[in-house]
Amino acid sequence: MNLSELYERPVLDLTTATTVGKVSDVVLDPGTRRIVGFHLAGVKGSASWLSWEAINALGADAVTIDRSDVLTAPPEHSRGLHADKVIGGRVLTDSGRELRNI
């Protein structure tokens, strides 16, 4: 799966069977090369962060969570990670050569 496929994927609360938001961007940890969480759009309130650990499932049509209270405000540590528009951003090698956009 490409990261671009996650853009605007709905996030569903399994307890209430409602959409709580949509994925607006992915936050990556460059050291581990893993997804650490998602920024969400269209959520009510300031809880627009979904950590990777809080996800129930990542399916072809939606991301599911057990309940909406797993959403939080973005953590401070996300600012030091690749958090600025990963989806649609450039992909570079370690030497700086551009590979493609994601």
Image (spheres, helix red, strand yellow):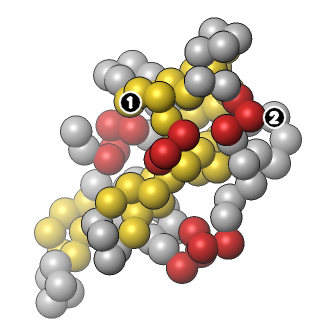
Work out whether residue 4 can be spotted. Answer: yes
What residue is pinned by disc 1? 58
Q: Judge by depth and name the residue closer to the eye, 24 or 55.
A: 55
37 lies left or right of 29: right
Q: Give SS at disc 1.
A: strand
Looking at the picture, how far across and down is residue 49, in whole percent?
64, 49
Work out whether residue 25 can be spotted. Answer: no
Q: Judge by depth and name the residue closer to the eye, 19 or 50.
A: 50
* Residue beneath the point at 50% across and 24% down: 64
Q: Sequence-wise, which precedes: disc 1 or disc 2?
A: 2
**Against 59, is 24 above or below?**
below
Q: Residue furthest top?
A: 17
Quadrant placement of the C terminus: bottom left
Q: Quadrant of residue 44?
A: top right
Q: Judge by depth and name the residue closer to the eye, 33 or 100.
A: 33
Indicate the amino acid at tag 2. Answer: Lys
What residue is pinned by disc 2? 44
Query: Do the residues under discs 1 and 2 have CB atoms within 8 angstroms?
Result: no
Q: Residues within 10 Å of mark 2 (few under 14, many from 20)?
A: few
Q: Quadrant of residue 88?
A: bottom left
66 lies left or right of 98: right
Query: In 3D space, how far apart are the residues under numbered discs 1 and 2 (Cα atoms)?
Result: 22 Å
* Residue beneath the point at 33% across and 44% down: 4
Q: Please count the marks in the image.
A: 2
10 lies left or right of 1: right
Looking at the picture, how far across and down is residue 85, in whole percent?
48, 61
Looking at the picture, how far across and down is residue 26, in whole percent?
46, 53
